[in-house]
Image (cartoon, rainbow, N blue to C red):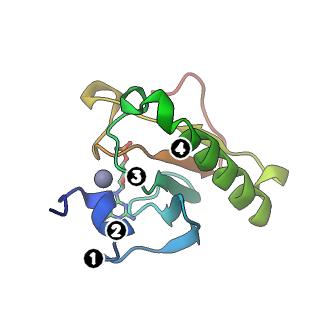
């Protein structure tokens, strides 16, 4: 049975999204509510709610995810600017979609520590 996870539905093209990069393992979309001049979400196509739920036998998920982010960042020349990668897990950290995703944010001054 197909799951009802928002990002799985976007991956399956059941919900529209601005798709900016895609390969066999990873989809990158524009965030619908951008928190910076550029704000993308890199989403592994396999559904896991958090990085600690990925079994060691599926370690390629991380390799492919970060290789895809690297490729996208180079394509968009973001490495010449600045960017921040963020993964929120759990309600208190601000996670609202329970499917691993890496925020790629930039184009403005970023504060540290994050709020
Ligand atoms: P989280 O809060 O889980 O770290 O990140 C989820 C992100 O998904 C949020 O930044 C939110 O704006 C984004 N988002 C929620 N629904 C949609 C949607 O339907 N389409 C897109 N492109 N982004 C979404
Ligand atoms: Zn999912």
- The residue to which callout 1 is attached is 14
- The reply, left or right, for residue 46 in relation to residue 41 is left
Q: CA distance from mark 4 to mark 2?
A: 18 Å
Q: Residue 25, image x and y in percent?
A: 53, 58
Q: Residue 105, image x and y in percent?
A: 58, 49
Q: Residue 111, image x and y in percent?
A: 60, 31
Whichever of labels 3 and 4 marks the residue nearer the N terminus, that label is: 3
Which residue is located at x 25 percent, y 30 percent? Answer: 91
Quadrant of the image containing the N terminus? bottom left
To which quarter of the image does residue 21 belong? bottom right
To which quarter of the image does residue 33 belong? bottom left
Callout 1: helix, strand or loop? loop
Contact between marks 2 and 1 (CB within 8 A): the answer is yes
- Which mark is nearer the camera, 4 or 2? 4
- The residue to which callout 3 is attached is 46
Q: CA distance from mark 2 to mark 3?
A: 12 Å
Which residue is located at x 55 percent, y 64 percent? Answer: 24
Q: Which mark is residue 10?
A: 2
Extreme residue in the top direction:
113
Contact between marks 3 and 4 (CB within 8 A): the answer is yes
User: Are there few (<14), some (14-19), or many (20+) residues within 10 Å of tag 1?
Assistant: few
**Residue nearer the viewer, 106 or 4:** 4
Callout 3: helix, strand or loop? loop
Quadrant of the image containing the C terminus? top left
* Dot 2 beta carbon under 8 Å from ligand 1: yes
């Amino acid at each position: 049975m197909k799951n009802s996870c928002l990002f799985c539905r976007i991956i399956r093209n059941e919900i529209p999204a601005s798709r900016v990069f895609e390969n066999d393992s990873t989809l990158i979309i524009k965030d619908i509510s951008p928190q910076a001049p550029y704000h993308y979400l890199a989403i592994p196509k396999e559904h896991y709610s958090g990085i600690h739920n990925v079994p060691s036998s599926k370690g390629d998920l991380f390799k492919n995810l970060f290789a895809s982010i690297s490729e996208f960042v180079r394509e968009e020349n973001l490495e010449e600017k600045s960017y921040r990668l963020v993964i929120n897990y759990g309600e208190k950290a601000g996670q609202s979609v329970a499917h691993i995703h890496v925020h790629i944010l930039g184009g403005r001054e970023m504060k540290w520590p994050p709020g």
